[in-house]
Amino acid sequence: MINTNEILQTIKMLREEHLDIRTVTMGISLLDCARGNVKDTAEAVYDKITRYAKDLVSSGEAIEAKYGIPIINKRISVTPVSLIGGKYSSDDYVLLAQALQRAAETVGVNFIGGYSALVDKGYTKNDVEFIKSIPAALANTNLVCSSVNVASTKAGINMDAVADIGRMIVSTAQLTQKDSCIGCAKFVVFANAVEDNPFMAGAFHGTGEGECVINVGVSGPGVVKSALEQVKGEPFDVVAETIKKTAFKITRMGQLVGKEASEMLGVPFGIVDLSLAPTPLVGDSVAYILEEMGIEKCGTHGTTAALALLNDAVKKGGVMASGHVGGLSGAFIPVSEDAGMIAAVELGALSLDKLEAMTCVCSVGLDMIAVDGNASAETISAIIADEMAIGVINNKTTAVRIIPAVGYKPGERLDYGGLLGSAPIMPVSEFSSADFIGRGGRIPAPISSLKN
């Protein structure tokens, strides 16, 4: 039985602590959309997406009205587009990106993800052309998000892909320079990418998924911080239990929304991704949670331990609340989207190196980080390689969403507004990694991959 006190707690979470459903994401398989030529494939892609997702936005709005729960984004994820390509050129793939854009505009979603490729062990000829297409695809669309999986614990790290991705990111920044290099904010490179992630920019509908599914992403950093304010000075056992109980409540709300959307749309319910995804709003910050634990400023000594506790407790609470927890579930640490992270960078408490250390224990990795616009492609690739190594060796998902801020210097800011926030420009090492990246080939899978 739900008592009056629990109802009042939930109302407070929604009204004062920024609790929301960050996204309801419909995953759609496009494996049956391949045709004899790219124009027919693009048309089939557009037709299928608009047919399946035509009621996605209106259903989300109906759930918001019924329960009073804010649903910030309605999104779509699709089969990695490189998998439905024929003998396509990079220009052909851009046509598919434009078909995704048209479909997203028609059904009214906020973003569509899945302009993606999976190249952790090697390239096909199509993959090479696809990756060449990404800068133009992101420059010529505004709702399309892209990702490439370049590493996995089973396969190792495709260093040829890492080198190409560094050059591709720099090209994307240059093509979208007039829009604050926003193309790079819509691209993420992964190790061990998951197939049911509802969050952008890395969402795609994996080949192991069904025809169509509804996944829900829940967020609530402000709720967790508020809960910890009630246990000031208590031991870490109490802190962990408090986070678990709070995550349990948040996950229950996500499952309610997911099942309701599933029934309204006639589509199977997939997973709840309980990721503490912050926003630029003051009070809706993962950094503030860590500081509430006793860290004076995010980035100082002890930050990684605090984040490890937070990430683990969130997952434990979520798993108790739902049998369908998936995606990335845990704590995100994007810089531009977190007011506390931004403040920590600007005070000099949080550096790129410390962020890398924190990614060993968080949900994803280096996220929404803007760096010196003069950083070379090889430096970008080396940053990616470091992060991929963390994912591969630790058998976890890691990712990099990095923005070479062309025309900007450390200490300045890129301002996006909305959920993307503003990114303080961070310096990179002055020493070169060019010879390292120039080797190419593949860093072999670790011994831990031999589990058969």
Image (cartoon, grey):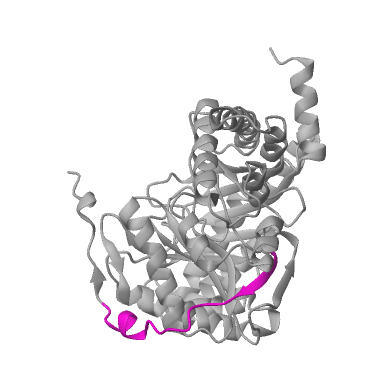
Quadrant housing residue 229: top right
Quadrant housing residue 183: bottom right
Residue 409 in the image, given as x and y percentages of width and height: 64, 83
Look at the image and tell me whether residue 268 can be seen.
no
- Is 340 located above or below residue 62 in the figure? below
Look at the image and tell me whether residue 148 can be seen.
yes
- Is 70 located above or below residue 389 in the figure? above
- Is 142 located above or below residue 213 in the figure? below
Of residues 317 and 140, the one nearer the viewer is 317
| Residue at 70%, 75% in the rendered image | 413
Horizontal relation, residue 241 to residue 232: left or right: left
Of residues 307 and 52, the one nearer the viewer is 307
| Residue at 50%, 46% in the rendered image | 305
- Is 345 located above or below residue 429 in the figure? above
Residue 431: say if magenta: yes
Residue at the top extreme? 1
Residue 438 in the image, given as x and y percentages of width and height: 31, 84
Q: Quadrant of the C terminus?
A: top left
| Residue at 52%, 42% in the rendered image | 311
| Residue at 47%, 68% in the rendered image | 41
Residue 75 in the image, given as x and y percentages of width and height: 62, 53
Residue 127: say if magenta: no
Horizontal relation, residue 440 to residue 390: left or right: left
Q: Magenta part of the protein: which range?
A: 420-440
Residue 336 in the image, given as x and y percentages of width and height: 66, 64
Of residues 417 and 346, the one nearer the viewer is 346
